[in-house]
Image: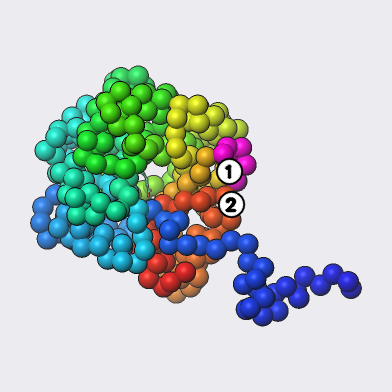
Amino acid sequence: MLRRPRRNRKSAAIRSLVEETRLAVSDFIFPLFLIDGINQKVPVDSMPGIYRYSLDLMLEEIDSCLQLGISAFDIFPAYPEEKKDRFATESYREDTFYLKALRTIKQNFPQACVMTDVAMDPYNSDGHDGLVENGRILNDETLEILGKMTLAQAKAGADIIGPSDMMDGRVGYLRKLLDENGYKEVSIMSYTAKYASAFYNPFRDALDSAPKSGDKKTYQMDPANSREALIEGQLDLEEGADFLMVKPALAYLDIIQLLHQQFPLPIAAYNVSGEYAMIKASAANGWLDGERAMLESLLSIKRAGAKIILTYFAKEAAQIGL
Ligand code: PBG
């Protein structure tokens, strides 16, 4: 036997020499859930270890993450039902708690990279990412609302906006609007290939944002398809996206790899709420080693070609040291 692959695995020292992929805390974007009020830290039942914070406690959380080396945060607001309407009007009301919080976060931590979510669902009484009329999700009318939301978030200090709505043409529409309004520096991380997935449920619990009727299959992608991701990627590239994102991550490693091979933009992957919940639930039952399963899945996402990982594990992974 001339070729004995095990020689390259014989000691920790050799294994670390041949190791091709290494996670870094700087790869992570940490999603955080914001609620109105003060001194609030409300657990998300389906995501053990994850909380909804009021601004004062979120500032403390961000501070402790920055000390661990996490410097990017994706902030999602959870609104009470009475603030929601069909047109997601609350999303661009200047004094709404989400926009005020973004301003305060940027004032306190100018060095932090703050990403925001552009989609109607947290503010929409229909629970959809777009405007609903007679059971249909209207594309072009939704763009106008997303535009107002985007400008309001840019004005509040967002560094990256994250359109997660999957409406056609939104990246180009939002890019143009940002440029025309003097926000040339605001980046766009497009949810390029976002699939109609069962893995978002814990997130919808966290935000109380599940659709009131129907599902998201007329705008989010069909899990059966990969070639469509190339069309989405091409459009986002042409429309000016700075990053392409695949979501969810673990059931879509092939899509991450495909976009990484086809497009020169940095690829991000969203390791979503259900992926987090699965590992947490089996670890709680003693069915697998939660820490090892976490690191192995994050590593797989990076190995597939994602440079950036949005993950609820960010803080935990940073705490154990990478
Ligand atoms: C909606 C949005 C969703 C997530 C991020 N933005 C849920 C959905 O599309 O229903 C999911 C994130 C997660 O599951 O962690 N605009």
Q: Return the x and y of residue 110 as percentages of the image width and height.
A: 25, 51
State the SS at label 2. Answer: helix
The residue at which mark 2 appears reads as 304
Residue placed at 36% from the left, 60% from the top?
70
Hey, which quadrant is residue 178 in on the image? Answer: top left
Give the camera-side residue of 259 and 85: 259
Residue 17 is inside the magenta segment: no
Q: Is residue 312 above or below residue 96?
A: below
Give the camera-side residue of 204 and 241: 241
Q: Give the range drawn in magenta.
A: 257-264
Residue 189 makes an appearance in the image: yes
Most distant residue in the right direction: 1
- Crowding at dot 2, Cα within 10 Å, few <14 / some 14-19 / many 20+, comes out as many
Ligand 1, what quadrant? top left
Q: In this view, does 287 lie to the left or right of 99?
A: right
The kind of residue on which mark 1 rests is His
Q: Return the x and y of residue 100 as percentages of the image width and height.
A: 15, 44
The residue at which mark 1 appears reads as 260
